[in-house]
Amino acid sequence: AQTVTQSQPEMSVQEAETVTLSCTYDTSESDYYLFWYKQPPSRQMILVIRQEAYKQQNATENRFSVNFQKAAKSFSLKISDSQLGDAAMYFCAYQNRDDKIIFGKGTRLHILP
Amino acid sequence: KAGVTQTPRYLIKTRGQQVTLSCSPISGHRSVSWYQQTPGQGLQFLFEYFSETQRNKGNFPGRFSGRQFSNSRSEMNVSTLELGDSALYLCASSAGRAGEQYFGPGTRLTVT
């Protein structure tokens, strides 16, 4: 069965600094999708970034980028120039083409002013 | 485009009762998924409906059921409520397989 592990329950970063959130997953599939979702204190979950496993190039969305290491089954999220609005719970998620999405337990990110 | 809406937003029920939660997806989205979120277990997948058919199911007891209507709106039902069912129930819609999921604000269920 597929699993997603986020080993950092909480992290803190100084405003304007860079932070990396870790995520590892376990699967025997070769074709799948990986996501990072953000859940701010208001509770509405939103997609931050999406990576397709067959693409070697790491996805980027403005200040958010990933380091996708398929062989190592690692999918970390880097947030550059951290802003106060980045404070949230971040969930790593895995989905293969025909199955449900599996979420990690989440990492709570605090931004220190 | 209007986002995913869930009703009610808050609910308090007593053990043994049953509850029905509603989710209206984004217009044009045919897939609706339900999740239970608790501090201890995180986000757990309940089920997914696509074109009125249950396409995937998580590991929850039969007390948890759902359905989807022809307009893609979905309902989730929990019968014989237990204290452990207290959670935030999130609904998400998507345009198709492996597509981005758009989440609603959730329904906070408290069982006393």
Image: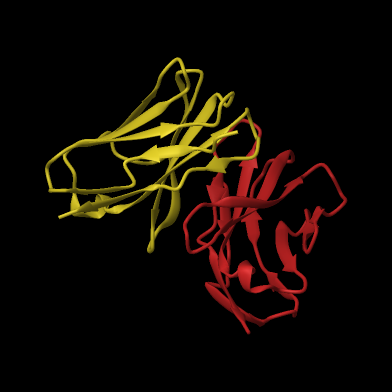
Quick one: B81 or A113, which is closer to the camera? Answer: A113
Q: Position of residue B43 (x, y in %)?
A: 45, 52
Shown in red, the chain is A
Residue projecting furthest to the right: A57
Q: Quadrant of residue A113?
A: bottom right
| Quadrant showing the N terminus of chain A | top right
Q: Position of residue A58 (x, y in %)?
A: 83, 54
Q: Residue at x 63, y 55 (%)?
A: A25
**Which chain gets the yellow colouring?**
B
The furthest residue to the top: B70
Is residue B84 found left or right of B39 in the rendered image? left
Residue in the picture at 47% in, 22% down: B72
Q: So how many labels did they put on this image?
A: 0
Q: Position of residue A82 (x, y in %)?
A: 71, 74
The residue positioned 69% from the left and 43% from the top of the image is A33
Left or right of A46, for residue A75: right
Residue shown at 77% from the left, 45% from the top:
A53
Res. B101 image quadrant: top right
